[in-house]
Each structure stands twice: as C-alpha cells, then as structure tokens.
Image (spheres, rainbow, N blue to C red):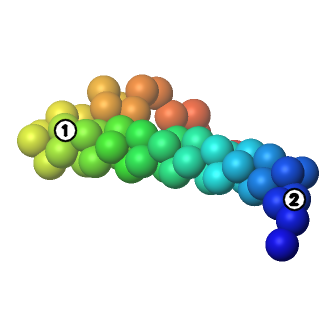
Amino acid sequence: MAVDNDFIERFEKEIKLLKDLQKAASDGIERAEKRLERIRNGEPREVVFGRVPPKQ
C-alpha cells in the first residue's frame, strides 16, 4: 500500500488543530475554576469578573 503523504499532512494538521482547541478549553476551564474558588472564598462577583454592563 502506497503512503499518501497529502493525507498524512492533512491529518497531522487536524491533530494539531484539535490539540490547540484542547489546550484552549483546558485553559478556559482552569480560569473558570479559579474564579469560582475566589467567589466561594467570599470575593464579590464584581471584583472577580469586573464590571458587568446592565441587561438591556
């Protein structure tokens, strides 16, 4: 069976993209968990999240 280099390159790019997405998701989860912990420790939401504009 011949090796399809184009397929392999595309597949490697897809894997890299998925790893980048995985890292971004992990980083977001970590930030959210830290914020939640700060809120549980009594910090006001406005301090943890900054000023939130009022609902329209």
Give me the residue at 39% from left, 33% from top. Answer: 49
Give residue 38's mark: 1
Q: Quadrant of the N terminus?
A: bottom right
Looking at the rendering, which quadrant does residue 47 occupy? top left
Q: Is residue 42 left or right of residue 15?
A: left
Mark 2 or mark 1, which is nearer to you?
A: 2
Number of labelled discs?
2
**What residue type is disc 1 on?**
Arg
The x and y percentages for residue 18 are 62, 53
Where residue 46 sits: x, y (%)? Answer: 35, 32
Residue 6 visible, this angle: yes
Q: Residues within 10 Å of mark 2 (few under 14, many from 20)?
A: few
**Left-right relation of 19 to 5:** left
Give residue 8's mark: none
Q: Which residue bears the numbered disc 2? A: 4
Q: Secondary structure at mark 1?
A: helix
Residue at image point 10% right, 41% down: 41
Task: Please name the amino acid that badge 2 sits on.
Answer: Asp
Q: Is residue 7 visible?
A: no
Residue 42 at x, y percent in the picture = 12, 40
| Image location (x, y in percent) of residue 19 | 56, 48
Q: CA distance from mark 2 to mark 1?
A: 51 Å
